[in-house]
Image: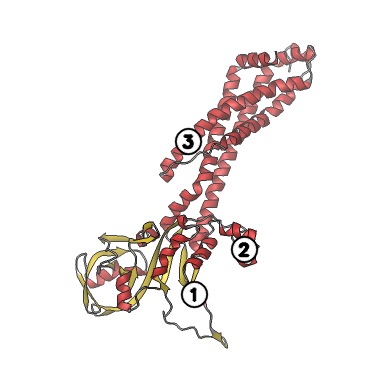
Amino acid sequence: MFIRLVYESFRRQKRRKALAGIAITLGVAVATAMIAVATDVGDKISRELRSYGANLLVTPQEDTLDLQIGGVDLKPPSDGAYLNEADLPKIRGTFWHHNIVGFAPMLPVNVDADGKNLTLLGTYFSKKLSFGKDDFATGVRITHPWWKVQGAWPDDNSQDVLVGEGLAARLALQPGDQIQIGGQAHRVSGILSTGGVEDGQIVAPLGLAQQILGRPGAVRRLYVSALTKPEDALARRDPKTMNAELFDRWYCSPYVQSIAYQLQEAIPHSHAEQIRQVAQNEGTVLSRIKGLMLLVTLAALLASALAVSAAMATAIFERRSEVGLMKALGAGNASVAALFFVEAMLLALIGGVIGFAGGALLARQIGRSIFDSRITIDPVLLPVILALAVTVTFAGSALAIRRAVKFDPVYALRGEG
């Protein structure tokens, strides 16, 4: 009998219910899309932000040692400390190696080129390396994507070089020309534009810089581009002060600090630190984007609750004679409230399922159009969304139902509010 009353109520008030259902569906769809994107967006935004360059710098440990006597800094100013190039592939053996997008070693060398004292910067362009069974390519074409070349990139195993656009203008060089470096001719494969100091330098394969310096395998600094999560209270703690359980949690989280720690483990006698401005800006962008998504979700749910409230209030007012009849026949406040709450719950479940399906499609569209990738919808999100739909519907209906149970049956049967 109770189910039949609910069915008859739905049939008679289908227009009002349709409006409330649409409001719930739209709100739930937006909430589903925003929650799905927010939970899957971290790595995708991090990959987009990697276009701004490396976020970790690895240098020889000796560079971090302070040697002062009587307030006088006695640390040698020379570039005598180097990393070993043979240790670099070990980065692929770290716990978070899948988060390492790429790395690029740097070795600056002073050279005599066309009668001028210039800096030649040795690096990887797109160097093919291997670690165990893992073959990969890395270099500045990954870590420094804003570097632009007019002409062609040199092969990492060649003797060709790039010339910065400022230097090329002074020396009147074009791609394909020759430049004398240390008495030997080298082909200029391209003109490099970076907007930085490299525009006034020669950029060459790392092997050529090591050959000129006379130090095979030497690397002065290493830029690493890694996918990381924003800092929180745990990330900012000193790992030396952590107990074993807390340290394992910190170590197994992709914080920029924990990845830097693992880089120091992989590369002997090294010091790794975040390029703080880049890392902090990324964390700020991620936090603000997720905060914006949360606000959109809350706004959509609030709008749905208000729409449901208006629709339910009108529907219940139009049915005040039914409520009066029920109460005149002996129905208590709990029975009347239960009838309307069951209606609201059915409405919420139907709207929640439809909204979840629509939100999943919307999330995938956002992923394709903004991140050029697919947003994964976790099935565990469905019960969460249904719970949200029921909560929002109940919140929007509560005031109207409270008024319904207080109807005086005498006035209600006469059609008076």
Q: Residue at x 66, y 17 (%)?
A: 6
Q: Is disc 3 placed on a helix, strand or loop?
A: helix
Q: Quadrant of the C terminus?
A: top right
Which residue, given by chain and number where applicable, does mark 1 sit on? 61
Mark nearest the camera among 3 and 2 is 2
Which residue, given by chain and number where applicable, does mark 3 sit on? 362
In the picture, measured across the screen, residue 278 lies left or right of residue 335, that is: left
Query: Hey, which quadrant is residue 35 in on the image?
Result: top right
Q: Residue at x 57, y 21 (%)?
A: 18
* Kind of residue at badge 1: Gln
Q: Residue at x 63, y 31 (%)?
A: 306
Q: Quadrant of the N terminus?
A: top right
Q: How many marks?
A: 3
Determine contact: label 1, label 2, CB under 8 Å: no
* Kind of residue at badge 2: Arg
Determine contact: label 1, label 3, CB under 8 Å: no
* Kind of residue at badge 3: Leu
Image coords of residue 152 (percent x, y): 25, 60
Q: Is disc 1 placed on a helix, strand or loop?
A: helix
Determine contact: label 3, label 2, CB under 8 Å: no
Which circle's residue, 1 or 3, is located before the other in the chain? Answer: 1
Given the current orientation, which residue lies at the most extreme left position?
Answer: 177
Rounded to the nearest angstrom, the CA distance separating label 1 from label 3 is 50 Å
Residue 237's label in the rendered image is: 2
